[in-house]
Amino acid sequence: MRNSLKIKSGIFLAVLLIATVSFLGFLILRGIKNDQEKRQETYLREQSNIASVYVEQTILAESNGQVDWYEEEPIYQRLGPQIAMRLGTITGMHIFLYNDKGEKIGSSGFGSFDPKLVQFGLQNKIAYKTAGDMFYYVAPLKNGLLGAVGFVYSLQESNYFYHTILNLFLQFGIVVIILSFLISYFYFYPITNGILRLKEATEQIEQGKYITHPPLKRSDELGKLSQGVYSMSQQIEQNIITMKQEQAKLNMAVKKLKQLEKQQKVFIGNITHEFKTPLSVILAYMDLLEMYRDDPTLVDDARENIKKEAERLYHLVEKVLHLASVEKYDFEIQQEKIESSEILAELCERMRGKAQKFDVDLKCDLRQASVWMDKESFYLIFINLLDNAIKYNVQGGSILLTSEVKENTLNIKLQDTGIGIPLEAIDKIFEPFYTVNKDRAKSSGGTGLGLALVKQLVERQQGTIVFHSEHGHGTEVCLTFPLYDGK
Ligand code: ATP
Ligand code: MG
């Protein structure tokens, strides 16, 4: 199979050349044969004319011109052997003379002619035949009235010439076969080899083994084909890589989507639970109030708890709405140049009341810096973080809010001396509804949504947020935001 093309091209070339040589040989040999026959005929016709004239002249000379060609001619009969011998000497051929009855009357050699041929001569026709290397030719004498003359012409020389040419062609044919294989080897081999290499290259590509260079380096059409195969291989490889990358991205997206779906289910479950709890407390108090309307202690208790649960519900609705709006409405973010130290100082003042309520000392040490971000988001981030630092602090504890500028970044640090976060919980605090201590969060009105919102807002502003904390040893929150670059 591998060599089929090479063998085929060799055979094709050999057949083509042999056919050409055979055809040429056939034409040439036929030409030679025809020419030889024509020459023989012309020569023998001339010789028969000479013989005819010689016979007539001899008879006329012997009879002193008194001869009647239609009568029995005894002179011819008598001089036959002599004339035949003389004609044999003149022509250099064996001559046979026949009378008008077809009887041999003289010859320059042995043997005789086919009587059928002689009969043709007597009927004033020329006849000839070939036997072996001899050519027998019969011509009429005096229109056959006198008889006929036969020539035996040797074909040895012309046959020798013909066979020499034939042998030459046969030898040439053998040379042509050898030559055709040599030509096909030296000329067709590189071509067929190139085609085989191209075939191998395409098979490799089919198996996904892409070629790193063109299989052939030629300047002809095969070279262009090789370049085309190489480009095609590169293109396919590139397409496959892109396809795989797209597939990987798609898989990631599907995975993320599934994760999101799962998170959403958990989120909805949590929301339902968080909404139900205060509502059921409120409904329970409503039932009790209907049953014991006149119990003043119950009325006071119910008012206080219903208010607390309603506030908790309000707080919850507000956070959920914030979170939902951050996730959905990108266009609501309106970035502007803001002075971070001014806003942070203002927020510290606003939160100081709550800090005092929790018996926590709040201090600020801020550097002036401008950032390009949404003001509302900036407020929400730090209100939530300060709220946590106060809520999860200890009595008599303290909070320190500092900011500094490093290169093109604004670094803000919020340290508190609170209860801290256990190591295993650090990664979970950004999950919606996650609280380290349910009771503590509940008692302080926490829903576990604050940090989920903070994280979303920080990331939307191209910022980062990291928590460092140790259980019982306070918490440090580090944030970075890109500085306003004047553009
Ligand atoms: P919300 O913010 O919705 O009112 P929350 O404050 O409990 O409720 P997050 O702000 O999301 O919720 O905080 C998640 C949890 O991380 C908190 O419940 C708390 O356990 C822990 N946490 C957050 N900040 C601190 C902190 N400064 N010190 C100790 N624990 C903290
Ligand atoms: Mg919070």
Image (spheres, helix red, strand yellow):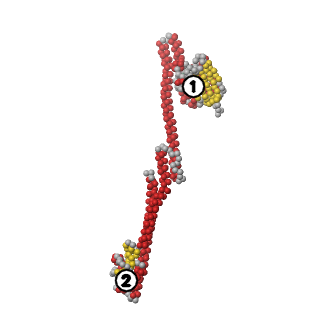
Q: Which residue is labeled 1 in the image?
A: 467
Image side of residue 189 versus residue 88, left or right: right
| Residue positioned 41% across, 85% down in the render | 57
Q: Position of residue 82 (x, y in %)?
A: 38, 84
Tell me the amino acid under the disc marked 1. Answer: Phe
| Mark 2 element type | helix
Toward which corner of the image does residue 90 lie, by quadrant? bottom left
Q: Position of residue 384 (x, y in %)?
A: 58, 23
Task: Name the mark nearer the viewer: 2 or 1.
Answer: 2
Residue 145 in sight: no
| Mark 1 element type | strand
Using the image, tell me which numbered label, if any, was put on residue 81.
2
| Residue positioned 53% across, 15% down in the render | 304
Q: Nearer the viewer, residue 275 or 39?
A: 39
Image side of residue 270 versus residue 401, left or right: left
Q: Nearer the viewer, residue 478 or 257?
A: 478
